[in-house]
Image: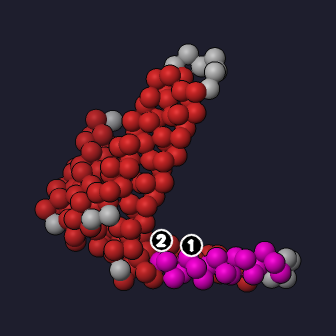
Amino acid sequence: MKNVVLGILAIILGLIVLAFPLAGLVAASVLTGFVVLMIAVWLLIVGGSQMEVSKSAGIMNVILGIIVLIVGIGLIFNPAIFAFLAGFLLYLAGIFLIIAGIISLLSRNDFKNATWAGILGIILGILYIILGTLAFDPIYLGALIGIWLILSGIFALLE
């Protein structure tokens, strides 16, 4: 029953985000920003408490906490940062998948489906790079978020 309710809510939310992709992007950016801010606060607290045990670890956590705090504030007040980070991370994942696919194709291992795994890695890597290109545009990123919500809702209903 819980999956049915969550699935229906995800589909409805996905349709709303598809209708208003920029609003969906802003909501995702703000939500992500608040989560990142919570991580920053946690890092600052851990860093402050570590100062007595290990000054260098405490200082590193405080510095990391300040950097994460700045990123979190940026995500809340500037959704373009969210679009940039999403696109960049998709590019990076695509590059890693292509490299892993090539390594799988070139390596001589006993894995029965190594060739297919390599081909799939390269295809997925190219797809991730294409999605990364789309994610740099806030409207496309909002649409991708909407599509993801709809697909998640459908899979929740099928469970």
> Outermost residue toward the right?
53
Q: Where is residue 44 drawn, in percent x and y?
A: 65, 81
Identify which amino acid the numbered label 2 is placed on. Answer: Val
In the rendered structure, the answer to whether residue 150 lies left or right of residue 43 reads left
Query: Is residue 67 inside the magenta stretch?
Result: yes
> In this figure, which residue is indicated by the disc labeled 2?
35
Majority secondary structure of magenta residues: helix
Q: Position of residue 62 (x, y in %)?
A: 68, 81
Q: Give above or below for 132 relative to 59.
A: above
Would you say the residues marked 2 and 1 are in contact, meaning their CB atoms lie under 8 Å apart?
yes
Residue at x 39% of width, y 74% of height: 81
Other-residue count near label 1 (Cα within 10 Å), few / some / many at <14 / 14–19 / ≥20:
some
Question: From the viewer's perspective, is residue 23 above or below residue 9?
Answer: below
Residue 157 numbered tag:
none
Assess whether residue 147 is covered by the magenta stretch. no
| SS state under label 2 | helix
In the image: residue 102, left or right of residue 30? right
In the rendered image, the residue lying farthest to the left is: 19
Residue at the (31%, 46%) spot, across then down = 152
Kindly identify the amino acid type of the residue bearing the numbered disc 1.
Ile
Q: In the rendered image, which residue does mark 1 sit on? A: 39
User: Which residue is rendered at x = 81% and y = 78% of the image?
Assistant: 56
The magenta segment is 55-72
Q: Secondary structure at mark 1?
A: helix
Q: Quadrant of residue 32?
A: bottom left
